[in-house]
Amino acid sequence: MKVLTPYLLMALFGFTGSAFWFPNCELTLSAMANVDQVPAFKFLWWTINLSNYKAESGLLLGFATAIGSTFGSSFFYFMGRGALKVSKKVQEKIDKTDMSKYKRIGAPVIFVSSVTSVPPLSPLAVAAGIIKYRFWNYFFVSMAGKFIRFTIVVFASEGLVKLIKGLF
């Protein structure tokens, strides 16, 4: 179980970071990717050694975070799909609008947003739900973008820690 702990933690933090915006996935992931750099410390009467929870694979750590984060942002998709009630007037306008052009550019916009977080994915997820963009398309495109982003965070943070340690 100890081997799975960092991955399960990051899947959980990815989920809560996307669904509730706390904690920040990137900061938590940076810390988890570098736990072996943290010396053991005392907390009350326990000695805590975070390096025991070092992830074996940065790719798996990024993947676990992406899965959790994608499930978290799916809440916003389902809000747009119907869990979030809009007025009849707004719903009629949505129903009359030709959504095909929005669905056509949906994947690139969702992917870029997932990789860069610009614009934030939460409002885009709501919009994807409103225009009835296919859920599995949303899910896999979003997860692919988040996997790229979180994998970059893992390896960039490891490199940054090595650079800073080399300066001192």
Image (tube, grey):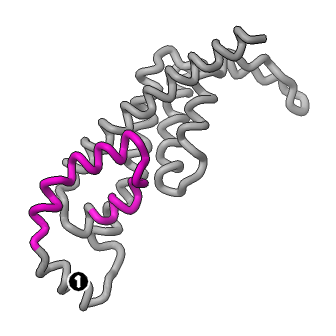
Task: Return the residue nearer the eye: 97 or 1.
Answer: 97
In the image, residue 122 sits, relative to residue 31, either above or below, namely below
Task: Return the residue nearer the eye: 70 or 123.
Answer: 123
Q: Is residue 136 visible?
A: no
Residue 4 point in image, percent of width and height: 50, 24
In the image, residue 104 sits, relative to residue 49, either above or below, namely below
Q: Is residue 119 visible?
A: yes
Residue 24 point in image, percent of width and height: 58, 45
Residue 96 lies left or right of residue 136; in this view the side is: left
Q: How many residues crowd around disc 1 within 10 Å: few (fewer than 14), some, or many (20 or more)? A: few
In the image, residue 103 sits, relative to residue 60, either above or below, namely below
Q: Please report the residue visible at 29 percent of the width from the left and 43 percent of the height from the top.
A: 111
Task: Return the residue nearer the eye: 167 or 42.
Answer: 167
Residue 155 point in image, percent of width and height: 50, 20
In reply to whether residue 110 is colored magenta, the answer given is: yes
Residue 168 lies left or right of residue 123; in this view the side is: right
In reply to whether residue 113 is colored magenta, the answer given is: yes
Q: Please report the residue visible at 53 percent of the width from the left and 57 percent of the height from the top.
A: 20
Q: Please report the residue visible at 57 percent of the width from the left and 16 percent of the height from the top.
A: 159
Q: Please report the residue visible at 23 percent of the width from the left and 83 percent of the height from the top.
A: 91
In the image, residue 24 sits, relative to residue 103, either above or below, namely above
Residue 106 lies left or right of residue 159; in this view the side is: left
Magenta span? 98-127
* Amino acid type shown at disc 1: Gln
Query: Residue 94: which quarter of the image?
Result: bottom left
Query: Residue 89: which quarter of the image?
Result: bottom left
User: Which residue carries the number 1 mark?
Assistant: 91
Residue 73 point in image, percent of width and height: 40, 53
Task: Return the residue nearer the eye: 53 or 117.
Answer: 117
Mark 1 residue element: helix
In this view, the residue farthest toward the top is 166
Q: Which corner quadrant holds the C terminus?
A: top right
